[in-house]
Structures are given as C-alpha cells and as structure tokens.
C-alpha cells in the first residue's frame, strides 16, 4: 500500500478553502451538505455567480492571515502563485491544519481522492497522484453499483445499533443479523424511499428467529445493449442469487450480473416450447421462499408486453416481497437508434405501443383508431402478421404511402433498419429474412430514419 486513506469526521470541523477559481469551487462543492464549518477566502474576487455552489459559505474577499486559519482542521489552497501557496501552507500548518495544495502535491500534506458521497458512507479512490483520470473512471464504475440510498441505510443502522446490541448480545449472531438486514428486504425498502417500513422490517428480523424471506425483483433488461440497463437494474443484478431470464436477454446483459448467481433459462429455443407462465411464477415463489434474492429479468420493460403484471400479481398473492425495476422498452430503443422520433410537432401527436399478436379469444385491435392520422404506431411482435396488419390499417383508412420502418435487433451490434411504405410492409418483412426480434413503425415519423434518408439522398442524386 503506497498511500493511506484516513477518514476525518466533519462534525464541528472547520474547513478552509482559499482561492477564487474553478479549483477552489470544486473543493467547496465537496462540502455542500456536510456538517463541516466551511470558511472561504477568495482574495482575487468572486467567480461568476452561476458557477457558485448552490448552498455554501459566503466568500471573504481577502487573503487569510494566521489568526484567520487558527482552529482549522483542513485547509485547501487553490491559488496560482507558487510562492504564495507555499507561504499560506506554512501558516496553515502552523495553525495545526492538514494542508492540500491544488496541483502542487509536494507543498501539501495530503491529496484529495475521488469521492463517492453517500452521506455517512463515503468511498474514496486514491492513486497517489499518479492517475487522477483513472481514479475518476473507477469512481463512475463504483458509483453505478452503489445504491443511492446508502446514507439513509447507514443512518437507520446507526439508530438501531443499541437496540440490536441488547437484543442480540452474541457477537457472531449479531453480525449475521446485520448481514441479513443489509442484504434483505429492509435495504430494498430504504432504496425505494420507505425508511419507516424498512425500520419495521429490521425490527421484525430482529424479533423472529426465522430465516430471512427472499425477495423478487422484476427487472427490465432493456433492448439488449448492456449500456441501456438502468443503474438500478445493474445494482440488483449484481446482488442477485438467482436470475430467471428468457430469450430476449442477451449474454452481453447477463455478463453484467453477479458472476456466481445461478441462471435459470425459461425462454424458448427454436421449435421448443418455453416454460409455461404459471411454472415460471411458481419457480420465482419457490426460490424466494428459499431465501434467495431473485431477479426475474425480462427484455425491454417488464410492463410493456412482458407479462410482468401477471408476475407481480402472483408474487403479491404468494406474499413474496416484490419490486419492479423499469427498463428501456424496445420502441424507445429502436426509435433512438434508427433516428425515428416517436412524436413530432408536424407529423405525430401521439404514439401507440401495440401488439399484432392477439390472445386467442382476446380483444381484437381497434383498427379504426390505429389507422388514424398524425400518430406513430410501434408494433411489437408484429413481423409474423405484417401483411395482415398493413391490410387492416389500409382498409381502415391509413394511406398506402404511409412510411414504415422495421428495426431488427434494435440497440444490438447486429441491428438492421429497413424502410418502405405501408402497402409493402408484408413484402419488406418477407424479403428481410428476419432472425432477431423486430419492431415495426408505421407513421410519417418513420420517414426520418437514417436508412430512409439515405434512400432519399440516392434518389435525389
Ligand atoms: N417487454 C419487451 C417486449 C416484449 S415482446 C419490451 O418492453 O421491449 C417481444 C417483442 O418486443 C419482439 O417481438 C419485438 O417486437 C420487440 N423487441 C424486443 N426487443 C427488441 C429489439 N432489441 N429490437 C427490436 N424489437 C425488439
């Protein structure tokens, strides 16, 4: 270990920042919301008001002297002039402070690491001054997997500390309790902003000897590009014991999950039948009851043609704690990568997510409404019935010349965009030999796709 990171409590601590520039502001921003008493000297005048930290100390427009610095614990010096910086460092050190001199590590006592700030919980990355940009990159990676509500969780634990100590005197048993509490439903409740419920859950855990019940997260995996996972999805994936997934979730997404999580595949393979819905739900319940943290990972968003609603109901009926994490649905992702705005002030006042697949004996599509002008249709599971769908829309009054786009494997490396007009939708699909999931767009906005624009450019040339 080449550097040592100590942590300094900020209650009743005076922190001084000296300087008028961006570097001084960056230091001030570190302490916004902290209990430290921050004193700011801006001898060269104040920077533009717009760049000032929202809340924070008023600046004193003067150079501090020894008396000004007495009693301070940390002093950050962000002034241009090296001799001046050295002089200030000397005075600050004389006053008993630890000194940081921005950009001149040799003049100071410590360097500022890259921080991840979660209130009580602070993660810091130091590189001994060798690679600050690397530290910043590492910080974003760690930031992404840490729940936003870590601070409140730590605070709750702090409040219950004494109670837990008296209720569970045995050290090992107490450690097991905390492990269960931090990994369990209580932490999930804090994460969704329900501290009172979380507290109740922790107390329940404390007073029952029963093993902790598992939990189910019904998670939207997005369209396939792992970068389109939400931070929340990523976090629960990295925390999962069991992942129940189907065909729409590619390996690139699963690779972001905890490595030793058990993966259960419940999707179709070609020609094969997928696991029936009620068996999937039974599996989710069984795993959760065995105390597992279950992630039910679904392509796109779980509530858009994903049967996530049925799974949610089933978990509730079974009394299994359940949370839903939304995902980027295929229509949004395909539109983004194909360059098709879903609404447009001149062409589409609404967008409809619709499926061409009918449940046997279910509700028939309202063609008259779907054929209305000034709207974009995003048709899910539509490739198999493309010709019939186009015919129904045209019969109901949509123009034959309405632009259409087919996006196959949206957001994935093998994405394809095919464009044409509504009267040829069936033919376009047939000629495309689609092998991956495909979304159909119908409406004037489909003409904005990059593929369509290329065709127009060729025609014009
Ligand atoms: N819950 C999913 C939809 C599941 S239905 C979501 O919100 O996206 C399955 C249909 O979604 C597919 O038939 C296809 O029409 C569409 N789909 C899913 N992922 C897709 C992708 N990456 N590219 C194009 N279409 C996709």
Image (spheres, rainbow, N blue to C red):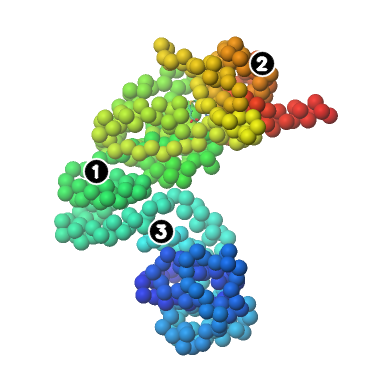
Question: Looking at the image, which residue is at 39% across and 75% down?
Answer: 13
Question: In the image, 48: left or right of 209?
Answer: right
Q: Which callout, 1 or 2, points at the residue further toward the start of the chain? A: 1
Pointer 2 residue Cβ closer than 8 Å to ligand 1: no
Q: Between 131 and 24, which is closer to the camera in this rendering?
A: 24
The image quadrant of residue 298 is top left
Residue 113 in view in this figure? no
Determine whether the residue tagged by mark 1 lies in a helix, strand or loop: loop
The image quadrant of residue 38 is bottom left
| Residue contact between numbered discs 3 and 1, judged by CB atoms under 8 Å | no
Question: Looking at the image, which residue is at 46% across and 67% down?
Answer: 31
Q: Which residue is mark 3?
A: 118
Question: Looking at the image, which residue is at 78% across and 30% down?
Answer: 457
Quarter of the image where the C terminus is located: top right
Task: Relative to 390, say whether 224 is above or below.
Answer: below
Q: Which residue is mark 1?
A: 212
Question: In the image, 216: left or right of 219?
Answer: left
Task: Relative to 449, say whether 106 is above or below.
Answer: below
Residue lying at the far right in this picture: please name it.
461
Q: Which residue is mark 2?
A: 400
For marks 3 and 1, give the one nearer the viewer.
3
């Amino acid at each position: 270990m080449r550097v040592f990171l100590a942590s300094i409590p900020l209650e009743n601590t005076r922190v001084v920042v000296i300087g008028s520039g961006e570097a001084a502001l960056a230091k001030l921003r570190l302490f916004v919301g902290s209990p430290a008493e921050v004193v700011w000297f801006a001898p060269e005048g104040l920077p533009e008001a717009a760049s000032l930290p929202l809340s924070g100390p008023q600046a004193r427009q003067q150079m501090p002297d020894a008396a000004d610095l007495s009693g301070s614990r940390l002093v950050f010096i962000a002034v241009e002039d090296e001799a001046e910086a050295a002089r200030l460092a000397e005075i600050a050190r004389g006053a008993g402070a630890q000194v940081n001199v921005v950009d001149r590590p040799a003049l100071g006592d410590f360097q500022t690491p890259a921080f991840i700030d979660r209130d009580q919980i602070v993660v810091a990355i130091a590189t001994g001054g060798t690679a600050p940009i690397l530290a910043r990159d590492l910080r974003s990676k760690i930031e992404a997997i840490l729940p936003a509500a870590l601070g409140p969780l730590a605070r709750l634990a702090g409040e219950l500390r004494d109670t837990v100590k008296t209720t569970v005197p045995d050290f090992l048993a107490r450690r097991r309790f905390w492990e269960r509490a931090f990994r369990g439903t209580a932490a999930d409740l804090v994460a969704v902003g329900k501290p009172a419920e979380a507290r109740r859950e922790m107390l329940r855990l404390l007073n029952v000897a029963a093993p902790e019940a598992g939990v189910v997260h019904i998670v939207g995996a997005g369209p396939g590009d792992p970068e389109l996972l939400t931070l929340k999805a990523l976090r629960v994936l990295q925390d999962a014991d069991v992942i129940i997934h189907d065909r729409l979730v590619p390996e690139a997404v699963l690779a972001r999950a905890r490595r030793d999580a058990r993966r259960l595949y419940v999707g179709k393979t070609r020609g094969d039948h997928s696991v029936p819905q009620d068996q999937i739900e039974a599996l989710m319940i069984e795993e959760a009851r065995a105390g597992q943290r279950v992630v039910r990972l679904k392509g796109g968003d779980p509530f858009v043609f994903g049967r996530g609603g049925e799974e949610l109901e089933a978990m509730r009926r079974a009394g299994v704690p359940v949370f839903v994490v939304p995902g980027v649905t295929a229509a949004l992702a395909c539109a983004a990568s194909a360059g098709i705005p879903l609404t447009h002030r001149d062409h589409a006042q609404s967008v409809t997510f619709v499926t061409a697949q009918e449940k046997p004996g279910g509700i028939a599509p309202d063609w008259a409404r779907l054929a209305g002008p000034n709207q974009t249709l995003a048709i899910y599971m539509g490739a198999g019935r493309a010709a019939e769908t186009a015919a129904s829309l045209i019969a109901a009054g949509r123009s034959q010349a309405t632009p259409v786009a087919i996006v196959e494997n949206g957001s994935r490396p093998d994405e394809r965009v095919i464009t044409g007009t509504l009267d040829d939708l069936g033919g376009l699909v047939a000629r495309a030999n689609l092998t991956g999931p495909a979304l159909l767009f119908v409406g004037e906005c489909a003409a904005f796709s990059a593929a369509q624009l290329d065709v127009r450019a060729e025609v014009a040339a």
